[in-house]
Amino acid sequence: MTTAFPVVEESSVRTSLADDISVCSQCRLCLDLCDVFPSIFAALEGVTDADPHLLTPNQQNIFSDSCFHCGACTQRCPHRGPDSEHEVDLPTTFIDLMQVRQLNGYFTVRQRITNWVLSAHDLTGPIASRCATFVNWCMQRPDTLRRRLVTAVTGISSSVHIPRISGQRFSTWFRRQPMPVASDRPQVSVFATCSVEYFSDDAARSVIGDLASRGRHCELATTRCCGAEELRAGRVRAFRKRVRRLTKLLGKESSKGPIMVMSPSCLAHLRTNLIPHCDRDLRPNAELIVDRLRSPIEVLTESTSAGTSRSLGTSDSRRSLLFLPGPHQDPSERTAIEHAIASDSTTIQVIADAGMHMGAWALRQGNEEGAHRTIKRMAKRLPTPTDAPRTVARSGLLSSQLLAHETGDDVVDPVTVLLSASSDEQ
Ligand code: SF4
Ligand code: SF4
C-alpha cells in the first residue's frame, strides 16, 4: 500500500516499491504495455529467488525513470489499482521515489534542469508559443544538429517527433470567438490544459465551435496546467501548491456546470490526484470539482442526441474505424463513439487496452527508446491493413502523432469522429 504524500523516508519508499513488485503472480498481462515491466522481470532473473527486495536502488531508479505515468497497468494487472485486493499502485510509488530522490538531492544539476523543463509548462509554454516559428524550426526535424544542441542544454531527446507549437494560443483564439449569451443551461468551463493551449489542436477548437453553435455558452477557465508533469518529476511540493490554487480557481468557475478538461491524460490525472493531494480544509471543494470534471466527448454527448446512429461520411462504401480508448476513459465515451458511427457503410473495431497516454516525460533523453518500443507494441495490436480505407481514432497528442508516424495511418482525435458524425446528421 503506498501513500501519495508525504513521503520523505527513503528506505520505506524503496521497501514499498519492492513490496509492490512482489505481489506479481507472473501472469505477464502487462508485458506489452511499456518498458517498465519487461525491465523489472529481466532484473528479477538476476537476483536470488527473484526477490524484488534484492534489487538495487539504481535498478529501482531506472524503472521509475521509464514510467510515463499513463496508469494503464493499474487497469490491466489483476493485483494493482485501487480496486484490487492489494491496493498497490506502481505509478504512485514511482512518484514517491522521484520525490525522495528530489528531496535528498540525488539528481544532478542536468537532471534537475530536465525535470524542470519537462514540468514547468506555465513558464516554458508561453515562451515557446511566442517564439513558435523559431521553436518549430529547432524541434520539428529529429536527429539534426539543432536538436542535439537542444538536447545538450535541456535533456529533451533529439530523436522524438514533437507536435508543432501553435503561434496562436488557444486562449487567444477562444477570446475571439462569438459566444451565445448565457442561458439557463449551466455554462461549460473550459480547462484548456497545456497541450491544447500551446500546441496546434484543431479538434479542441472544433468542440468549442460545435458547442457554441448549439447555444451552449463556454467560458475559459483561468488556469491552464494540471501539474501532471510536476508530479511525474517528483516535484510534489510544487504540485501541492498548484492543487491548492486549482481548487480555489476551479471552485470559482461559474455555476455548477461541467468543467471540460480538453486533454484526456490531464483529465485522468485530475480525477486521480486532485483529492489525495489536496489540503484537508479544501477537500470538500476538491470533491465537488472532481464531480464536475468532464471530457469533451462527455460534454458533447450531454449536449446532443447521444445514442443516435449516424454514418462516418457517406462517400466510402467500405470504411473502417479502429478506436483505441485511452486508459481511464469512461465506458460511456466508447458507447458514444460506437453509437455515433454505427452504420452499414462504416465498421468500428475497438482495440481495447492499446491506448496508452504519453506526456512530456516521454520526451526525456533516455526515454525515447522506451517510447518507441511502446508505440511499436501499440501498433502491433492493430489489425493488418486491408485495401479498405481505415481511420484510427485515439486521443492524446504525442502518442497519436508517434502512432501515425509508426503505422502511416491517419490518426484522428475521437472527438473529431463524433463531430463529423454529428454534422452528417444535421
Ligand atoms: S499484470 Fe500484474 S500480475 Fe501479471 S505479470 Fe504484470 S505485474 Fe505481474
Ligand atoms: S508507463 Fe504506464 S503501464 Fe507502464 S508502469 Fe508506468 S503507468 Fe504503468
Image: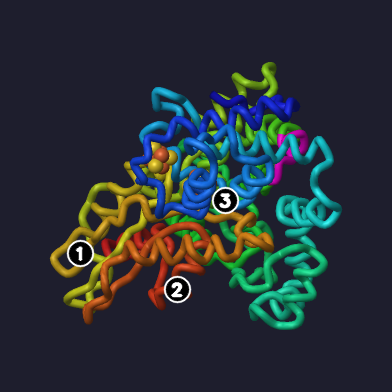
Mark 3 CB lies closer than 8 A to ligand 2: yes
Element class at badge 3: loop
Magenta residues, start to end: 233-239
Q: Nearer the viewer, residue 423 or 29?
A: 29
Residue 367, image x, y percentages: 61, 60
Q: Distance from label 1 to label 2 (Cα)?
A: 23 Å
Number of marks drawn: 3
In the rendered view, does 154 fall on the left or right side of 318? right
Residue 283, image x, y percentages: 62, 21
Residue 135, image x, y percentages: 74, 73
Q: Is residue 42 visible?
A: yes
Q: Mark 2, residues whose alpha carbon is within 10 Å: few (<14), some, or many (≥20)?
A: some
In the rendered view, does 385 fall on the left or right side of 251? left
Amino acid type shown at disc 1: Thr
Residue shown at 20%/55% (left/top)?
309
Write down which quadrant ligand 1 falls in.
top left
Q: Is 171 colored magenta in this rendering?
A: no
Q: Is residue 69 above or below residue 404?
A: above
Looking at marks 1 and 2 on the same chain, the residue that comes earlier in the sequence is marked by 1
Q: Nearer the viewer, residue 330 or 213?
A: 330
Q: Mark 1, residues whose alpha carbon is within 10 Å: few (<14), some, or many (≥20)?
A: some
The residue carrying mark 1 is: 347
The residue carrying mark 3 is: 68
The residue carrying mark 2 is: 406
Residue shown at 24%/47% (left/top)?
307
Q: Nearer the viewer, residue 28 or 103?
A: 28
Looking at marks 3 and 2 on the same chain, the residue that comes earlier in the sequence is marked by 3
Q: Is residue 174 visible?
A: no
The N terminus, quarter of image: top right
Residue shown at 26%/72% (left/top)?
384
Residue 425, image x, y percentages: 26, 62
